[in-house]
Image (cartoon, grey):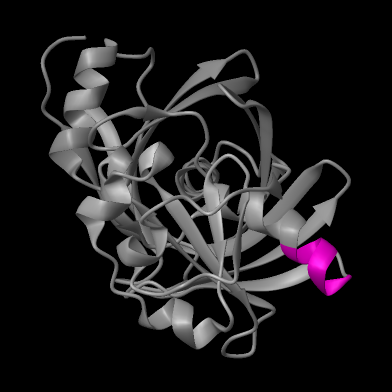
Amino acid sequence: MLPYWIVDAFTDRLFAGNPAAVVLPEKFPADALMQQIAAENNLSETAFAVPEGEDFRLRWFTPTVEVELCGHATLATAFVLAHQGRGAAFRFHTRSGLLTATVDGDVVSLDFPARRFAPAEMPAGLAEALGAVPLHVVQSADLIAVMADAATVAALKPDMARVKALPGGAVIVTAAGGEGVDMTSRYFAPGYGIDEDPVTGSLHTQVVPYWAEKLGRTELSCRQASARGGHMQCALRGDRVQMSGTAVLYASGRLRVPEH
């Protein structure tokens, strides 16, 4: 049996933010089993963290694929480790390099690599997929569609089949401002088995460099306008993005899975 927790990340209340499962085995199960566990959990991400010296090796799985980077499940992992009495500062070795997290009460601060952006051509079918016409698009790790205002972002009801058919199978939609914040975003990723990710750390590694340049400041308050919703404070520090948010424990238990 494997110990696991479910944490609502980037929120200060239950049933908001982005739920992530955290599994802390002594060693990694087989890849196929980790993917089965993630599919069974049916959350946007399930994180597996294994001790590696004084650090941890961290991997993340959606219900359908392993991913290169995930913010909210990293936040959830640090939150769980801290509340298990395993420290307040953590180093995670991942497919995206070294990530760090510090925990102060229910606030977790993450240090992630910034992902740069470049101008891009608007792909055919994007406006039809989103149900609105972007001002323009840029390419980072994902396609980023920039809208005229935050209200447009919040009101979107995209056609997921059309979004899945876009290059990469995912799109970030963002605009300046919105409900007392500097920027508002949403993330549609049916190509990764997630129609809409409620609150996404990796999204902010892409949009923070963009909005820092456009707004002329490096510290930004951010909202993700999904149905669950969530907030974080972000800062661009050279080639790194720092993200801070709160978390709430929803559940804990043990997974009754085959021997691994």
Decide which of 203, 10 is in the foreground and name it.
Answer: 203
Horizontal and vertical percent position of residue 55:
63, 22
Please tell me in which quadrant of the rendered image residue 257 appears: top left
- Does residue 215 belong to the magenta stretch? yes
Could you tell me which residue is drawn at 13 percent across and 37 percent down?
A: 40
Q: Is residue 73 above or below residue 99?
A: below
Could you tell me which residue is drawn at 29 percent across and 71 percent down?
A: 15
The quarter of the image holding the C terminus is: top left
The answer to whether residue 156 is visible is yes
Figure disc tally: 0
Decide which of 38, 152 is in the foreground and name it.
Answer: 152
Q: Is residue 68 left or right of residue 30?
A: right
Dominant secondary structure of the magenta stretch? helix
Please tell me in which quadrant of the rendered image residue 235 appears: bottom right
The quarter of the image holding the N terminus is: top left
Decide which of 16, 87 is in the foreground and name it.
Answer: 16
Q: Is residue 251 above or below residue 68?
A: below
| Region in magenta | 211-216
Horizontal and vertical percent position of residue 208:
71, 59
Could you tell me which residue is drawn at 49 percent across and 55 percent down?
A: 200
Horizontal and vertical percent position of residue 93:
61, 22
Q: Is residue 210 left or right of residue 207?
A: right
- Does residue 144 belong to the magenta stretch? no
The answer to whether residue 103 is visible is no
Horizontal and vertical percent position of residue 182:
69, 79
Q: Is residue 143 above or below residue 63?
A: below
